Amino acid sequence: MISQFFILSQRGDSIVFRDYRGEVPKGSAEIFFRKVKFWKDDGEGDAPPVFNADGVNYFHVKDAGLLFVATTRVNVSPSLVLELLRRIARVVKDYLGVLSEDALRKNFVLVYELLDQIIDFGYVQTTSTEVLKSYVFNEPVVVDSSQLGPAGIFMAKRMPVTTITKSVVANERGGRKREEIFVDIIEKMSVTFSSSGYILTSEIDGTIQLKSYLTGNPEIRLALNEEVGIGRGGESIYDYGSSLGSGAVILDDCNFHESVHLDSFDVDRTLTLVPTDGEFPVMNYRITQEFKPPFCINALIEEAGPFKAEVTIKVRADFPSSIIADKILVQIPLPTYTTRVSFELEPGTVGNTTNFTEANKRMEWGGSEHTLHAKLTFSQESHGNITKEAGPVSMTFTIPMFNASRLQVKYLHITKKSKSYNPYRWVRYVTHSNSYVARL
């Protein structure tokens, strides 16, 4: 049971606000944003997804730069409310086609209609896009595709831009609906390196995401690698030759959406399902066995005098040159008494930016794979072992059309309604960094 639900922009503007029970003060959105903003400024990192302030429990998730927030005074399951917020974000995206501040403002009537059907007096009724289609009748206002921003650039290279912002309920011009289906293999990677570049821990959390625009909900068959194994009894898949070639894919564990039938999965690794409208995860999986990470990080910090130190960071890309990584950022926390940092890049280096944020003593470097040298100046002598006061090095990135696990969709078969029925099929691979860290 929740008391309020609201959506805030990155600036803290309240885009959508619904008070279901009148138990929480109206200014809760402002109180929440102030807490979250100054949580980070106080040096305590990002605000946790659940916290209490003045007797009010706040739950929030962040999606596409927007904050989805729920409040309540009663003791409810945090995981239940967080899952509800994620599902609301997914339903809104299904109807609007894209999650953005502009899309929400242009479709606020539709969003409020969705909220009235999803939640009644603080209690959840349904979060199914398929069910909501019978009760929600407002048509979405299409957002200009030119306002997608950087997040949609790499997707537009692989498919028409109009498909990225397409609603599951909107028709094409002339009242016809384009028959197409999207399958995304999204992997979040966690790797820890030693100071010399050796891998200490590694893990992949992956999801096969499906979004269907097929009328009549025909049955589909999705085939994975036949070499997929489940359980820790499999052999290592470490392959220095290529992370995109064939070979065994060993999953530690996995789970499937309730609509997936596994009758032939043990035989030929084929998933059979009747997809509902909207976006949903077909399969979640986890891999902890050895794999080849896309980047290798070497980091070193050494004292260069009583008030100085030198940092060397080397990042090497270990994937084909035909693949381009995006949004690369390397960060390293420095000793609290650091006053100045001077950067030295390799000669001829282009496309790199460096920055030293004095407020939180953090050094940032973004760009392509190179070696960075940085000279630190301290306001006082270092206290003993400087490696204990700095680091670790963290890295964030996104790599389109790449997956380190080598899990692949071999084919996507759709039951035909007629001989001329041939819907569009799109398969994409994306790898994100989750926790990519190198120790000093």
Image (cartoon, rainbow, N blue to C red):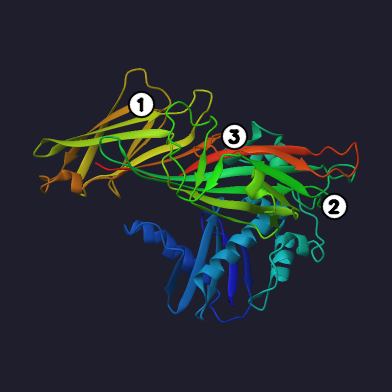
Q: For residue 105, say whether it is visible.
A: no
Q: Residue at x 18, y 38 (%)?
A: 377
- Kindly report which numbered mark, 3 or 2, lies closer to the viewer in this rendering: 2
Residue 296 at x, y percent in the picture? 36, 33
Q: Please say if 49 is above or below 378.
A: below
Q: Work out how far the residue at label 3 is from the one at label 2, CA to CA, in angstroms.
A: 31 Å
Instruction: Check disc 1 and give the amino acid type.
Output: His
Residue to which mark 1 is pinned: 370
- Kindly report which numbered mark, 2 or 1, lies closer to the viewer in this rendering: 2
Q: Work out how far the residue at label 2 is from the one at label 1, CA to CA, in angstroms.
A: 52 Å
Graded by Cα atoms within 10 Å as few (under 14), some (14 to 19) or many (20 or more), the crowding at tag 3 reads some
- Who comes first in sequence, dot 2 or dot 1? 2
Q: Residue at x 90, y 36 (%)?
A: 420
Q: Work out how far the residue at label 1 is from the one at label 3, CA to CA, in angstroms.
A: 23 Å
Residue situated in front as seen by the camera: 65 or 33:
65
Q: Which label belongs to residue 180?
A: none
Identify the secondary structure beneath mark 2. Answer: loop
Q: Residue at x 30, y 49 (%)?
A: 359
Identify the secondary structure beneath mark 3. Answer: helix
Identify the secondary structure beneath mark 1. Answer: loop
Instruction: Check disc 3 and give the amino acid type.
Output: Phe
- Who comes first in sequence, dot 1 or dot 3? 3
Residue 315 at x, y percent in the picture? 35, 31
Q: Is residue 356 left or right of residue 135?
A: left
Q: Which label belongs to residue 154?
A: 3
Q: Please say if 402 is above or below 283.
A: above
Instruction: Check disc 2 and give the amino acid type.
Output: Gly
Residue 304 at x, y percent in the picture? 12, 33
Residue 206 at x, y percent in the picture? 53, 48
Q: Is residue 137 left or right of residue 243?
A: right
Graded by Cα atoms within 10 Å as few (under 14), some (14 to 19) or many (20 or more), the crowding at tag 1 reads some
Residue to which mark 2 is pinned: 216
